[in-house]
Image: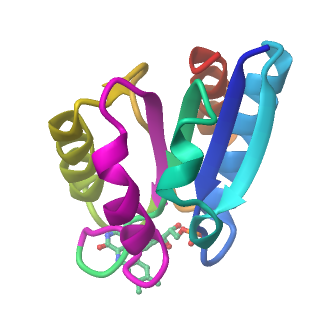
């Protein structure tokens, strides 16, 4: 059975709702899914999974959340080469720059982005939630 991790940070629940849909999509495709809060995941976990979905909203000034998510991601990114990953997150007033920068950072590590990233403006609507399910399925 394909093993998928969903690793996310969410302050007000919008990225959490996206993460829930990612989990549903991966499970519907038959994956064994484990959910981690950002501070619970470390580089030792990377090799345990066939695919990893990472979720983080735009924070600061178009950056990843700086207290838990970015330190975790900085710790693990050296272990992502060849790993199947996908990215999702919510944003507010920006234009998605945080996600473009994050995708570039992931590509530089040699990680394989298996599908387009999913962004939701504030709370995800039905369309974004459906895209999150497809993102989860794409990792299986
Ligand atoms: C401290 C802080 C910084 C933020 N910075 C940005 C930003 O740079 N660009 C943006 O589009 N939205 C920004 N936002 C808006 C959040 O990305 C948005 O509210 C998002 O829905 C939060 O997701 P969450 O509910 O998963 O925490 C910021 C919000 C906060 C609280």
Q: Nearer the viewer, residue 67 or 91?
A: 67
Q: Nearer the viewer, residue 59 or 105?
A: 105
Q: Nearer the viewer, residue 127 or 29?
A: 29
Residue 35 inside the magenta-drawn segment = no
Tell me: residue 26, above or below residue 106. above
Residue 75 inside the magenta-drawn segment = yes
What's the residue at 28%, 52% (across, down)? 96
Please provide percent x and percent y for residue 16. 69, 59
Residue 124 visible (yes or no): no
Please provide percent x and percent y for residue 71. 38, 73
What's the residue at 74%, 50% (across, down)? 35
Please provide percent x and percent y for residue 136. 64, 27
Residue at the outermost front position: 44
What's the residue at 46%, 69% (across, down)? 69
Horizontal side of 83 relative to 2 (left or right) equals left
Task: Name the quarter showing ligand 1.
Answer: bottom left
Horizontal side of 21 relative to 44 (left or right) equals right
Q: Nearer the viewer, residue 131 or 31?
A: 31
Horizontal side of 98 relative to 7 (left or right) equals left
Q: Which residues are magenta?
A: 62-90
Q: Where does the C terminus fall, quadrant-wise?
A: top right
């Amino acid at each position: 059975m394909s093993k998928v991790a969903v690793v996310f940070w969410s302050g007000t629940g919008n990225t959490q709702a996206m993460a829930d849909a990612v989990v549903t999509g991966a499970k519907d495709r038959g994956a064994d899914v484990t959910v981690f809060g950002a501070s619970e995941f470390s580089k030792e976990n990377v090799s345990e999974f066939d695919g990893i979905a990472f979720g983080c909203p735009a924070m600061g000034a178009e950056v990843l959340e700086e207290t838990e998510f970015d330190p975790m991601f900085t710790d693990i990114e050296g272990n992502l080469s060849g790993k199947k990953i996908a990215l999702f997150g919510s944003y507010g007033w920006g234009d998605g720059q945080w996600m473009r920068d994050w995708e570039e950072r992931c590509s530089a590590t040699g990680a394989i982005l298996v599908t387009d990233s999913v962004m939701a403006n504030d709370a995800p609507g039905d369309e974004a939630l459906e895209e999150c399910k497809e993102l989860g399925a794409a990792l299986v």
